[in-house]
Image (tube, rainbow, N blue to C red):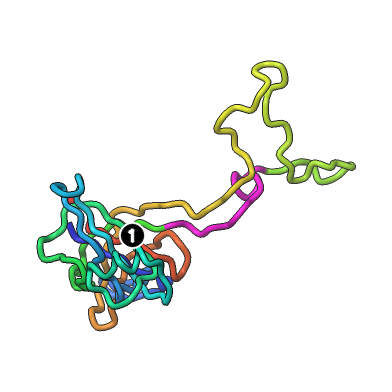
Amino acid sequence: MKGMLGRKLGMSRVYADGRKVTSVTLVETDSCHVVQRKTVERDGYAALQLGIGRRKRATKPLRGHLKKAGLGHVPARVIEVRGEFEDNVTPGKKLDVAMFQPGDRVDVVGWTKGRGFAGGMKRHNWHGGPRTHGSNHHRRVGSVGPGTSPGRIWKGSRMPGHYGNEQQTVRNLRVVNVDAEKCLLYLKGSVPGPSGGVLIIKKTAP
């Protein structure tokens, strides 16, 4: 398995596929390091802990955890990616974007844009109530459950609440170009999350 962390820079357009304009997402992968490697014998499953970015402060337990990997900095994000990786991927190693080649297929895991607390019209696309004739029910929820039986609100009812910031996976995206010098990955199409968001990029299983 091949995979690494990246940071979404935004979208652009390039000429590809016989000089056709192709919409691509630019992903920067300059600061992706291996923090820890987990094995089936020791941990019960195979995975890699990957770190990306830099930050100044960290707790003492995290600093001790990073010291075992030999990292001289504190990653901004540490994310665990499950799977069997190559034997030469060891803690402290910096992953190179050159592991991907143009034409490869990848799965991208991201987190959608967080929108905070949202009402039903924004969160669930409700059409709302009357806007005239003295109505005081423009964007409200309204009746939410039966009165006598069962006398409660059904579980799973659509309500206002936290909207966005959910994990989402886009599968089978094609790698259009790989810029090893600038550590950039050009992926055809869009990926979830805002510009600057962290992504997990894994090679699509055959």
For the N terminus, give its image quadrant.
bottom left
Q: Quadrant of residue 31?
A: bottom left
Q: Quadrant of residue 198?
A: bottom left
Say few, some or many: other residues with alpha carbon within 10 Å of mark 1 (under 14 / 14 to 19 / 20 or more). Answer: some
Q: Is residue 150 left or right of residue 8?
A: right
Measured as percent of width and height from the top left, residue 140 is found at 74, 42
User: Would you name the residue on which mark 1 appears?
Assistant: 79
Foreground of the two, 171 or 193: 193
Foreground of the two, 55 or 154: 55
Q: Is residue 174 visible?
A: yes
Q: Quadrant of residue 85?
A: bottom left
Q: Is residue 54 left or right of residue 88?
A: right
Label 1 sits on what residue type? Ile
Residue 140 among magenta residues: no
Residue 117 among magenta residues: yes
Magenta-tinted stretch:
111-126
Foreground of the two, 95 or 174: 95
Q: Residue furthest left?
A: 87
- Total marks placed: 1
